[in-house]
Each structure stands twice: as structure tokens, then as C-alpha cells.
Image (cartoon, rainbow, N blue to C red):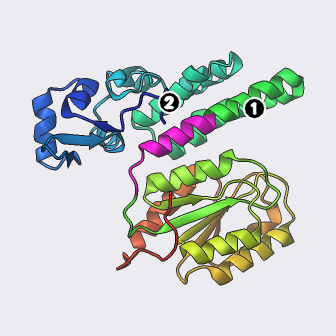
Amino acid sequence: MGVDGRIKAFLTPKDLAEALGVSESSLKRWADDGVIRVSRTAGGHRRIALADAVRFARESGLQIEHPAALGLEDVLPARRAADQPSAGTADALYAAFLRDDWRVARGLIVSAYVSGESVATLCDGAMREALGRAGELWEHGSDGIVVEHRAVDTCLQALSFIRSLIPSAPATAPVALGGAFAGDPYVLPSLVAAVVLADAGFRDVNLGPTMPTAALLSAVERYAPGLVWRTVSVATDGDTLRRDLAALLERMPAHGSIVLGGRGVPPGILQLPERVHHLGSMRELAGFARGVLAMRVPDREPPAGGAAS
């Protein structure tokens, strides 16, 4: 289910041509040349998955002028989003949070992605700034708490939808799995990490908040990940965190990495074992993930275990 329940999972060349403001004949030529990934119906008609359509628009620099043609009525026309600097997007997002206009807020986030902004840049920039300002409202009473919780929920919805627009990684791609440290109830940081890693090309398995070490070890055995993330958003004892990381390293595949981040990571954790990396932003995570994939020798067969999301 998409933003408003009318998302088109598969598009005709006419649909995408209308959305991009180009001719249908151009769309068909690009499809036949392999520029756009297409499938064929039983009758031989071209069909384009929405995720592939969005990827083509982002990579080609073509703007989605008419999102309604894709069933994306809540997404602002790309020309409007592209004209807004990051600070402007953050201000508009915060204003939408204040008035509880979740459609506009969600549309701003999704539109920024569709217009070409990376998930990592979006999360480190406009979303982080607007959520930070909303979080300060806690100091001003119960109404501020309501605004902050609604803002987080809106971001969760927007990021979940963006995740649906990212084409699935091939079965031979490595798995990235992770979740929040045990006792950490925050949902958003782990989801952000999952979407950033999916955008980089991993098969992401998000285990969400409050993930005990024993449960994560079981998941490592099941998925044989190339990368594990740990988000830490609440104050955490350094010795407990080190034991968690040491246990994970014992179960990780030989060339697997662990990434760690969040405001709850204690300063004394800086002395980390080899293959454990403390990252300070989603941009750093995206860059690290791309580096891992660039250096990786593809597996002949996909890792054993359950299917990634």
C-alpha cells in the first residue's frame, strides 16, 4: 500500500511518459534500448515497475512533473522540490509538523527522494533538523510531546514508502541486518539505517528496536550478513556494549563488518575491535556501505537463510 492507497505498482509507457513530461515514443525507445528495465505481459505489452521508474527518473535527472500519473498524488511536483534548498525543506517540514499536516510533511520527504536526494543526505539534513526542532518542544509541555511523536510517525511512514521505491537488490548481494541495542526503544534510527543500506545495494533485514544480543546472534546465524548495524539512542554502559560487539564478531562471517552509531554510544567506546566501525552520520554509513560493496567479490550463490526484505 502506498501513500494514499492508489499507488500503481506497474506502469505503462504512457503512464511514465505522462509523469515525466516526455513522449510515449521516447519512453518505448528507452525501454527497448535497455535504459529502463521493463517486463512484458502475456500479450507482449511493456510494463515498468514503479521502483524502476523512480530509479530511472533519479539517475537520468528527469523530473516527475505529474506524479498523479504514477498514483503519487501526495508527492509534490519535482520542479517544486528541486527549487527548495535543504534549509527551505527543513523549515517547511517543521512547519508541517507544527500544524500536524502529515500529508504535506510526508510529501516533502518523499518528493525530495524522488527528485534525486539520497536517503542519507535527506536524513542527515532536512529530516534531522526538523525532528530536532520538534524534539525541543518536549520542554514546553504535553502538546510539544504530541507534536514530536506525530512528527516521528510521519517520518516512519515516509521512509517506509521510500523503501518501497528502492528496487530489490539481487539475490547475490550481501545481507545487512541490525537493530537497536537491547533496551533502546527508538524505532526510527534503525529504520533509517536499513533504508540507507538498501539504497546502497544491500539486502536489508531490519530487526527494529530493543534487539537483545542473543536474538541478534540468532539472526546472524540465519542470514550470514556481510554487515551488521547497531543503533544506540539511549545512554548505554560501555562494557555491556563491548560484550555485545565481541559476541557478534565471533558469529560474523570472516569478512563481515559491524557498524555502530547513535547519541547513546559512550565516549569511551572509541577503542573498538577490528571490523567494528563507529560512524557519526548516515552519510558516513552510506559511504562505508558503498566501499564494502566495491571491494566485495560476488558470491557464487546467495547466503543461506531467510529472504531479506
Q: Residue furthest top?
A: 99
Neighbor class of circle 1 (other Cα within 10 Å; few <14, some 14-19, many 20+) is: some
Is residue 164 on the magenta stretch?
yes
Above or below, 152 relative to 65: below
Which secondary structure, mark 2?
A: loop
Residue 149 badge: 1
**Could you tell me what secondary structure mostly forms the magenta stretch?**
helix
Disc 2 marks which residue?
3
Instruction: Tell me residue 24's x, y (percent).
Output: 14, 29
Q: Is residue 182 left or right of residue 200?
A: right
Nearer to the camera, 304 or 209: 304
Amino acid marked by disc 1: His
Residue at the front extreme of this rendering: 42
Residue at the location (27% across, 40% down)?
60
The x, y position of residue 71, in whole percent, is 38, 27
Q: Toward which corner of the image does residue 261 lie, by quadrant?
A: bottom right
Specify whether 125 is left or right of 82: right
**Residue 232 placement (x, y as % from top left):** 75, 56
Crowd band around label 2 with a 10 angstrom C-alpha radius: few (<14), some (14–19), many (20+): many
The boundaries of the magenta stretch are: 155-168
Give, as a three-letter code, the residue at label 2.
Answer: Val
